[in-house]
Each structure stands twice: as structure tokens, then as C-alpha cells.
Amino acid sequence: MSAADRIDAAAERSPLVRAALEQARADHAGQVRNGSGGMPYVEHPVRVAALLDQHGYGEEVLAAGLLHDVIEDSDTTLEELREKFGDVVAGLVGSMTDDESIDSYRERKAEHRERLAAAPAEAMAIYGADKLANVSTLAAAYAEEGDAVRREFKVPVELKLEIWEEDLKLLRERAPELPFLDALEAGLSSFRASLGAPAQP
């Protein structure tokens, strides 16, 4: 079953998931995911939510997975999400949102990891699924386009990889029970090898 089919089925079962899918489609309309080979942006949150559904997470986690990028990438506010989807979903989306007031990419991601370390396990699950979807998508685009894919990012791909490896380390420490950490580790290792980058100590 494809990610889209899985989430369509979840949306049929749950009005909350259906509303979140509609919101994500509206907020990401016309956007293209960087480093994806031209993939419509909304396919990313759908893949994240599908991973979560595959491992049995409930409707509020799936809804937050679908909405996890809308604060960063649209005009929708966290308060609007809270009014429409409730405190649990909004809280999870808030945990997934970067603090854009921090200019340095590395510092912004470090601050995000600190917040995640204190967040509920469900937020860590969304975070892990997000990283796995990111690595899988970028690895596929890199295999297809080679170094041309680097031009789609504001920071070097090697820095993104380093940050994702730090993210995995956090998840291993704080949420070792998450079901997709081995897949994330394998994906990171494979992508690092394809870049010809030396392994991190």
C-alpha cells in the first residue's frame, strides 16, 4: 500500500485525520519539497503520517504528522491549529516547529533537539518519521540527480546529514523503543557512503 493510499484509508476512518489532510493539502498547495526531485511538498507529510500509521500510532499523532510543517511553511498559526484540532495535535506540531528567530542553522537545530528531549514520546515518533522520510527522499533524489540536488538547499548536504545523525543520537537516547530507528540509521549510513563522506565518530 502506498503512503497516499494508507493515509486516504486513515482519513476515511477518522474525521480528524481527514481534516488534517485537507489542511496540509491547502497549506502546502503549489509548494515543492527541496531535495526531492520536484516532489509536491504535501507528499512529505503524507509519507511521515503513513510511517506513523504503519506502526499503529493514533489519530492525533497522524494528524500532527500531516501538519508538522505547516507553521514553518505557510501562514497558518499554531493558535489556528489549536482551535481546529485541539491541544494535543497543536502541542505536537509546536514541538516539531523550528524557532526561525535563530539565524544559525546549526544552533536552530540544536535548540530544536533540546525542546524535543523534553517533549512527549509521540513528538519523538513524529520527529523520527520525519527524519526517515527526509533521508529516503534526499537519497533517492541524489541518486537520480547527483550533485545538482545540492543547489536546492541553503546549507551543505553534508551539514544536513551531520544534523540528522545528531537527531538519531537523541532519539536513540530518549526514545530507543521507536520502531524506525534502525531504518533511519541504515538510511543515514547508506547516504553518507553515497556522498563519499567519512563516517562520524
Image: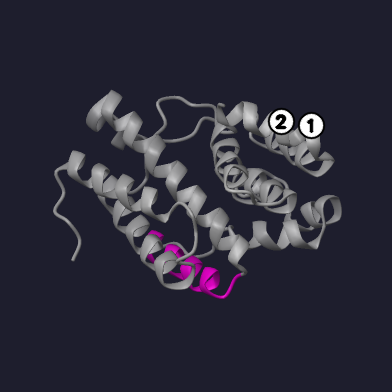
Packing grade of label 1 (10 A; few <14, some 14-19, many >=20) is few
User: Measuring 29% from the left and 45% from the top, which residue is drawn there?
Assistant: 157
Instruction: Where is residue 91? Give x, y as percent.
Output: 70, 63
Residue 45 in view here: yes
Residue 93 picture quarter: bottom right
Amino acid identity at mark 2: Ala
Q: Which residue is mark 1?
A: 12
Prevailing secondary structure of the magenta residues: helix
Query: How far is disc 1 from disc 2 in space, using C-alphas?
Result: 5 Å
Q: Position of residue 28 (x, y in %)?
A: 63, 34
Magenta stretch: give its range. Answer: 105-119
- Quadrant housing residue 154: top left
Crowd class of label 2 (few under 14; some 14 to 19; many from 20; radius 10 Å): few
Q: Which mark is residue 9?
A: 2
Camera-side residue of 183 and 165: 183
* Tag 2 secondary structure: helix
The question of residue 175 being in magenta is answered with: no
Q: Nearer the viewer, residue 147 or 67?
A: 67
- In this rendering, the answer to whether 39 lies above or below 125 is above
Of the pair 27 and 75, the residue shown nearer to us: 27
Q: At x 59% / y 66%, what residue is drawn? A: 121
Q: Quadrant of the C terminus?
A: bottom left
| Residue 102, x across and y down, in percent | 48, 65
CB within 8 Å, label 1 to label 2 = yes
